[in-house]
Image (cartoon, grey):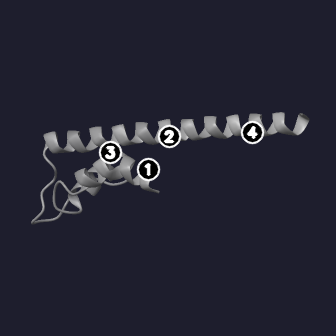
Amino acid sequence: ASNMHRMLYPLFKKIFMAPNPTPIKAFLSKLGLIENQVRRPLVELDEVARLELLECLQKVKRKIENAEIRLYEMRAQNRQGNKGGRNA
């Protein structure tokens, strides 16, 4: 859990770079789930902030994918090790 928290922490920081729900709506809009509109008095993220948020999201996504790959490889190695122990 702490490793996952460390991977997600940069995204947590970016989500609160502007008043809620503005960054979340920008993220969901990027996914095509909603339109990027907020009601007054809030304003949409400016282009620089939006790009920072989406770049951070991509970095975190890559970290999670890499962690999943490492976990899969570790499990495969453990299965191989267990097979060798049974046959001996």
Q: Say which residue appears at 32% left-offset and 45% top-offset.
A: 30
Which three-letter amino acid code belongs to the residue tagged 3?
A: Lys
**Residue denoted by label 3:** 30
Q: For mark 3, does the 10 Å Cα neighbourhood hold few (<14), some (14 to 19), or many (20 or more) residues? A: some
Q: For mark 1, does the 10 Å Cα neighbourhood hold few (<14), some (14 to 19), or many (20 or more) residues? A: few
**Mark with earlier residue (2, 1):** 1
Residue 43 % position (x, y)? 12, 57
21 and 80: which is toward the camera: 80
Could you tell me how far apart the alpha carbons at marks 3 and 2 are, in whole angstroms?
Answer: 24 Å
Question: Viewer-nearest of labels 2 and 4?
Answer: 4
Callout 3: SS? helix
Which three-letter amino acid code belongs to the residue tagged 4?
A: Arg
**Residue denoted by label 1:** 3
**Mark with earlier residue (2, 4):** 2
Residue 56 % position (x, y)? 29, 41
Could you tell me how far apart the alpha carbons at marks 4 and 1 are, in whole angstroms?
Answer: 23 Å
Residue 21 % position (x, y)? 24, 62
Residue 81 % position (x, y)? 75, 36
Q: For mark 2, does the 10 Å Cα neighbourhood hold few (<14), some (14 to 19), or many (20 or more) residues? A: some
**Mark with earlier residue (4, 3):** 3
Could you tell me how far apart the alpha carbons at marks 4 and 3 are, in whole angstroms?
Answer: 39 Å
**Residue denoted by label 4:** 79
Callout 1: SS? helix
Marker count (numbered):
4
Above or below for 2 versus 40: above
Could you tell me how far apart the alpha carbons at marks 2 and 4 are, in whole angstroms?
Answer: 18 Å
**Mark with earlier residue (3, 2):** 3
Q: Residue 53 appears in which quarter of the rendering?
A: top left
